[in-house]
Amino acid sequence: MDQHNIMITALCLYTAASFIYFFQAKITGSILMIMGIAFNVFGLISRGYIEDMWFFDLMADEVLALPAFLALIPIVLFFKNSKSQGRITLIPLVICSLIAFLPNTTTALPALKSQVFVAPAFFLSESMSIAFFIAAGALALAALLFKQETEETFMKCILWGFVIFTICQILGAAWAFLGWSYPFSWSGRHLASASAWCLYAALLHSGYARIHTRTKALCTVLGLVPIFFIVFFHELSHLLLLLAGKNV
């Protein structure tokens, strides 16, 4: 089974688990979700094995690792009996899995500058933090549209995401210094990371300013804009180029 088929299997398992979770089958849904994570991880591992050699940077792909981290969140919520909130987080899981796994991309090649420990640590920590931010955005959107009581959970997701995202920025600066001799550059992606960090830092302090729950929820949803730009930068760029070509 090649890497793409492994990831498609993970997508099917995530989708089946999400469907079963909606029918209250917590144990069966969790088993399928864990199987999906296992196939997801196996697909990442197989991606890093080229010509009888292991390349750890290829196994730490942000987009392909994101669904695995997202899948852990509904499992935790369901076992904490937060079933309605768990169902909400299943929606971004399926959407991100579709974006990540459906395209049959060409085999990635290892880069010399990525063959250091901080490179895969940076990619995986960024993917993990973004999973928390996306889950927070979905829960905040439910609070806005359906008046769900999700503030406590989406603020916890923001807290964990912010802590891991901060560590990620430090690892990224260290990797940039090792690979390019400077720790930061003002590209669009770096600006998106900086704006996301500032937004979530402000949201964590919003409790001290007595900001209304709906305002915090709205800002959390708006935070998905830089987050999706960060993680799906190449996919969005490719889509925009295709749209521009069609318009021409």
Image: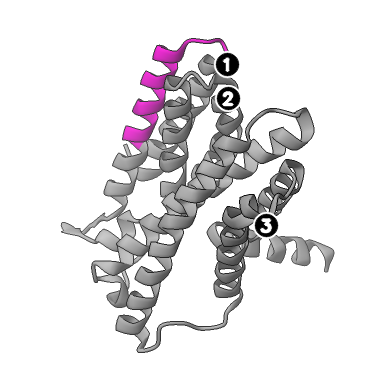
Residue at left offset 75%, top offset 66%: 245
Residue 205 position within the rendered picture, expressed as x and y whole percent measured from the top left: 59, 57
The residue beneath circle 2 is 87
Report, in whole angstroms, how far the alpha carbon at label 3 lies from the one at label 1: 28 Å
> Is residue 24 visible from the viewing direction of this image?
yes
Q: Which residue is mark 3?
A: 225
Say whether marks 3 and 1 touch (CB < 8 Å). no
Q: In terms of depth relative to the viewer, which is nearer, 120 or 240?
A: 120
Is residue 213 one of those drawn in magenta? no
Q: Amino acid at mark 1?
A: Phe
- Closer to the N terminus: mark 1 or mark 2? 1
Q: Quadrant of residue 23?
A: top right
For the residues marked 1 and 2, what is the alpha-carbon distance in whole angstroms?
Answer: 7 Å
Magenta-drawn stretch, dominant element (helix, strand or loop): helix
Mark 3: which amino acid? Val
In the figure, is residue 85 to the left or right of 127? right
Whether residue 37 is in magenta: the answer is yes
Q: Is residue 209 above or below residue 149?
A: below
